[in-house]
Amino acid sequence: MDRKRQRSNPNRKNVDKKTVWKKKDSKIEAVDQEIEQLKAKYNEIDVASVQTFSSFPLSQKTQQGLKAAHFEKPTEIQRQSIGLALRELDILGAAKTGSGKTLAFLIPILERLYNLKWSHLDGLGALIISPTRELAYQIFEMLKTVGKFHDFSAGLVIGGKPLREEAERINRTNVVILLDEADRILDMGFAQTMNAIVENLPTERQTLLFSATQTNAGTTRRHDTTQAHRLLPTSSVVNRMPSSSPPDLAARGLDFPAVDWVVQLDCPEDANTYIHRVGRTARCEKNGEALLVLLASEEDAMVEQLKTKKIPIEKIRVNPKKKWSIQPKLQSMCAADVQLKEFAQRAVVSYVKAVFLMKNKQVFDVTKLDVDKYANSMGLAVTPRLRFLQKYQKQQSLKRDTARDAPNRDTNPPHTSLLPAGSEEEETGSEDEEDLPQPPCRQQEAFGFDVEDDLDDILKVKAKTTVSSSDEDMEEDHKNVAVMFPQVKPSAKSKKLLTKFALAKKLAKKNIQVNTKVVFDDEGKEVADVHKKPQATSSEDTYEAGIDIEQVKKNMAEEDKFDKQLYRDKIKLKHKPLAVLDVDDADRCNIDDLPDPDKYYGPAASDDDNGSSDDDESSDHADRQKKTCQTVKAMRRVILRKRRMTARETVMTMTDRLRKEENGQQMKDWVWIRFLEMTRTWP
Ligand SMILES: Nc1ncnc2c1ncn2[C@@H]1O[C@H](COP(=O)(O)OP(=O)(O)OP(=O)(O)O)[C@@H](O)[C@H]1O
């Protein structure tokens, strides 16, 4: 219809176009006007009077997004920072965990891009760097919710895809969320990457930096977390996990709704980790509780660290009446389940290693750990072998001795004396390894593996990762690593893996005959193993040098013959009728220990022919004995071969066969009785 009208009126098309342009122009004008009006209000923002988001001069689209997400009142950090960010100032904001920092930087980003009328043609307009992949997703979700009425394109770059693809995506998007372990960036050797990103950003830019604190958020005290730390004797360190455990990844920035309590059974690596973990509760105007369990050896140094961050803590002691030990229960569980025991052993070793690797030796002093008690609390009667600890202790005492012997030398060179490659001391160390008193490795005896060895890899990888940076800070780490890994250089002995091939070579060299497996049948006869090497009689001794093709062909033909015969025998055995099984053996079979059928049925029943002579009787009896013997043996074979047959099926098979024979009924009954007796002794 429209087309018809258009055809009838050629000017119509031009009129429509004009209307569209007009509409577009007026829209652009309206946007420009809105931006101008908003900008004019930026300097008039009075933080004290801001009660709701609508008090901020924000674009209609952002206001709509906030409304749709049910964000009405700004949190303190949002109130304080949004106005400043709108004025294009750089911000360094510190606010409590869960205080709404994400929105505090997302709103200004949306507004800034809107004011600049940024479109997808302009490419990248904002860059958000988040510490973890999970947090990146969370920020992305928040951005999609609040910014859904805007026309910007947002992208999430979390790695794992080809670089070119990622680069193209970045160019196409306006707001990019990049993944990186921001908090740990320096620790993990990403300082260079970080610097490279910053160097490539335009010099004219606005920077918003937010960090999580516990108390610096001004008025956020309203919903402070109630915190306490609890001291436990070393015997109560059940279920303590190393600090590098997955929860610490989740502890950074992730927003879990309705977490009331954060209970830390292991000491956090430092005060910052504590803050991040505790920040999972008391989020956004809500209350929360946190409990930290510390060992006596960790208490002083850790509490000091928390105090310097102004974290309010309250010490509580456990009521001894309320305590009960689960140690006996765990011990019995470990005794009953080898796998569980293995897990417990691994847990002990990895925990001690984690403590050993911690940087802050004032808090994490491995020498103060009561490892035996810890192992006991995990249900283990014997502490797993901790070779690295022994080596470390030995090295320490050696170092002390050397210092005593050479007082004029620099007795405590900061880091170099413990692990200098190829140094004198290292050599001494490796010699000492032989002299080290090695405790009996009971877990190795029991399970055939060394729990500790399995974890050595983790140790090495960590060391490598930490050392791999070239940054100044990383150099410092490098030194620390040298202190932390005084002796973890694997000895040449442990480096070499004993492969099957190496083992076979070793045995061949020593001329040791390895055990062979011989299979016997029920009667004690050796069963030829078809999987065994060919047993043809050809001799290989005739070879003097090289390969004699003709001889090989002959041998192969013989082997072939042998194999075919073996196969035929196997098939024959399979189809052999049960009744004729081992008939030749019948005479040798002693059935005296079997119950006598006469005992069950009386002499009359067993007498088939009353008028027969004594001789006939005795020959009858012998016949019957022979038959019985055959039957029982055949039955046993059937039962053993066809284990999958049910007991009833087996007996039915046997009795069917017997029915056709002389004295069938009587024998059938007898077989039944014998069968029932046999089944009673079956495993
Ligand atoms: N103005 C607001 N009104 C209501 N809820 C809000 C507001 N701002 C943020 N929130 C909610 O508060 C929770 C915590 O916000 P957010 O994750 O941004 O905190 P955070 O300070 O970044 O925390 P962390 O330091 O742990 O990363 C989220 O569930 C978020 O939806």
Image (cartoon, helix red, strand yellow):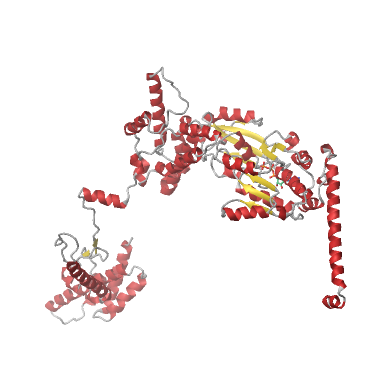
> Looking at the rendering, in which quadrant would you find the N terminus?
bottom right
Nearer to us in this view, 174 or 642: 174
Question: Which residue is located at x 51 percent, y 30 percent?
Answer: 361
Using residue 302 as the reference point, say whether residue 501 is left or right of it: left
Question: Which residue is located at x 72 percent, y 38 percent?
Answer: 91
Tell me: residue 243, above or below residue 116: above
Give the image location of residue 635, x and y in percent: 28, 71
Tell me: residue 548, above or below residue 660: above
Using residue 413 as the reference point, say whether residue 197 is left or right of it: right
Q: In which image quadrant can residue 263 be found?
A: top right
Q: In which image quadrant can residue 10 be found?
A: bottom right
> Looking at the rendering, in which quadrant would you find the C terminus?
bottom left
Q: In which image quadrant can residue 264 be found?
A: top right
Nearer to us in this view, 613 or 503: 503
Q: Quadrant of ligand 1?
A: top right
Give the image location of residue 118, x and y in percent: 75, 51
Give the image location of residue 266, x and y in percent: 55, 37
Nearer to us in this view, 18 or 614: 18
Residue 378 in view here: no
Q: How many marks?
A: 0
| Residue that protrudes farthest toward the left in the picture | 615
Residue 141 in view here: yes
Using residue 674 as the reference point, say whether residue 260 is left or right of it: right
Give the image location of residue 556, x and y in percent: 21, 69
